[in-house]
Image: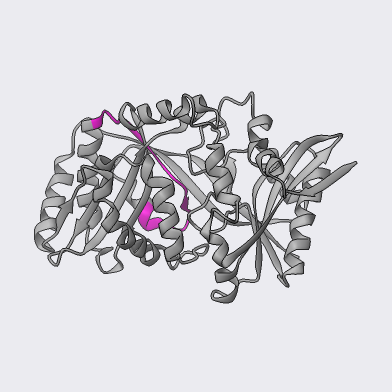
Amino acid sequence: MIQIVKAQSKKQFLDFVTFPNILYKNNSFYVPAIIKEELSAIMKKENPVYNNADASFFLAIKDDKIVGRIAAIVNWIEINEQKKSKVRFGWFDVVDDITITKKLIDTVIEFGKAHGLQNIEGPVGFSNMDKAGLLTKGFEELNTMITWYNVPYYKEHLLQLGFDEAATWVEFKIKIPTEIRPKVIKVAKIIKERYKLQIVKFKKNREILPHVNRMFELLNKTYSNLQTFVPIQQYQIEHYKKKYLPFVNPDYITCVSNEKGEIIAFSIIMPSFSKALQKAKGKMFPFGFFHILKAQYINDTAAFYLIGVDPEYQSKGVTALIFKEMNEVFLRNGITKVETNPELIENKAIQALWKDYEHIQHKERQTFKKII
């Protein structure tokens, strides 16, 4: 008999966030999340996203053993302001048993109907800053710190349950040249002089803080027209400052300002933490912190995390400036390859950034939807 239990106790929430570690214990491509960070993301008292969201977290139990998990989420900004009558599901992991998957999905559907909603879509988190998408290609690649990992049968289960494909994200692996191409240097110089732009760099994390709000403002402007976008709220910005700033190497952040000193573009790259997180096994202490700290400064791989460009400058070649600076960062730090984080497949402007570099699409992920 399969039992669906709503997580309410401290132990149940801990079981919820650690279930994938058990499920993928022997999978060499799975990268565990930091347990403390996962708990912080789903606990109402710790994540300010609950100012505009509701969620419940469920465990599937069979023969006294946890065999699946799922989150049911309502984002009220999406519903009330964007008029999308949608219940989200996320944090979805399950053993290869369609009966268990159906029980988990039916639980989310009941949650959605109780809130008067008409559609279900996932896997996604609370907002655009959370993990999203079921892995559908690249099962033999390490996931990054901001993506979920899963094996192929997840998609098969959802299709059998009547879901249709919704959004698609693609990810690329980029080879970094050993020297900056003359063309990149020339174009960057022309753009910089033509629009009177300046490069803004940072030596310490605290120097970044005064610019964070502007970066998120640019994110909202850059991605507002994409199908899955929900505007990022100020309370979320404060939360993400605390969550991600400790992982940032300031040398990997590049900002571009105009002649008024206003930030009009930025990029955030992080050294890859995938192998470090595997060694940490979900725990920062006693040794996990050491592995992550080491990865910040000794690494040959980086992850392209975020890029934002003011719409006024998006067709003016500003990204040439950013790429020149990034190339210099990579050469300084011994980075030979970069992995992009998920980009919506229709976001051709972002994908065009890699056209002058040797690259391959190595992963794909999707969300799935149906009427309830």
Q: As rendered, which of 107 and 205 lies closer to the eye? A: 205
Whether residue 190 is situated above or below residue 203 in the rendered picture: below
Q: Quadrant of the N terminus?
A: top right
Residue positioned 64% across, 26% down in the render: 25
Q: Position of residue 282 (x, y in %)?
A: 55, 32
Whether residue 242 is situated above or below residue 149 in the rendered picture: below
Q: From where the camera sits, is residue 151 visible?
A: no
Residue positioned 29% across, 31% down in the render: 335
Residue 303 highlighted magenta (yes or no):
no
Whether residue 305 is situated above or below residue 297 in the rendered picture: below
Q: Position of residue 172 (x, y in %)?
A: 42, 41
Instruction: List the single residue furthest toward the right.
Output: 1
Residue positioned 50% across, 27% down in the render: 280
Q: Quadrant of the C terminus?
A: bottom right
Q: Could you tell whether 303 is left or right of 200 in the image?
A: right
Q: As rendered, which of 211 and 260 lies closer to the eye? A: 211
Whether residue 48 is situated above or below residue 135 in the rendered picture: below
Q: Could you tell whether 45 is left or right of 235 in the image?
A: right
Residue 344 highlighted magenta (yes or no):
yes
Q: Position of residue 212 (x, y in %)?
A: 32, 57
Q: Could you tell whether 104 is left or right of 43 in the image?
A: right
Q: As rendered, which of 50 and 321 lies closer to the eye? A: 50
Q: Which residues are magenta?
A: 333-350
Residue positioned 39% across, 52% down in the render: 241
Q: Position of residue 87 (x, y in %)?
A: 67, 63
Q: Could you tell whether 341 is left or right of 93 in the image?
A: left
Q: How many marks?
A: 0
Q: From where the camera sits, is residue 163 visible?
A: yes
How did the renderer colour the structure? one colour
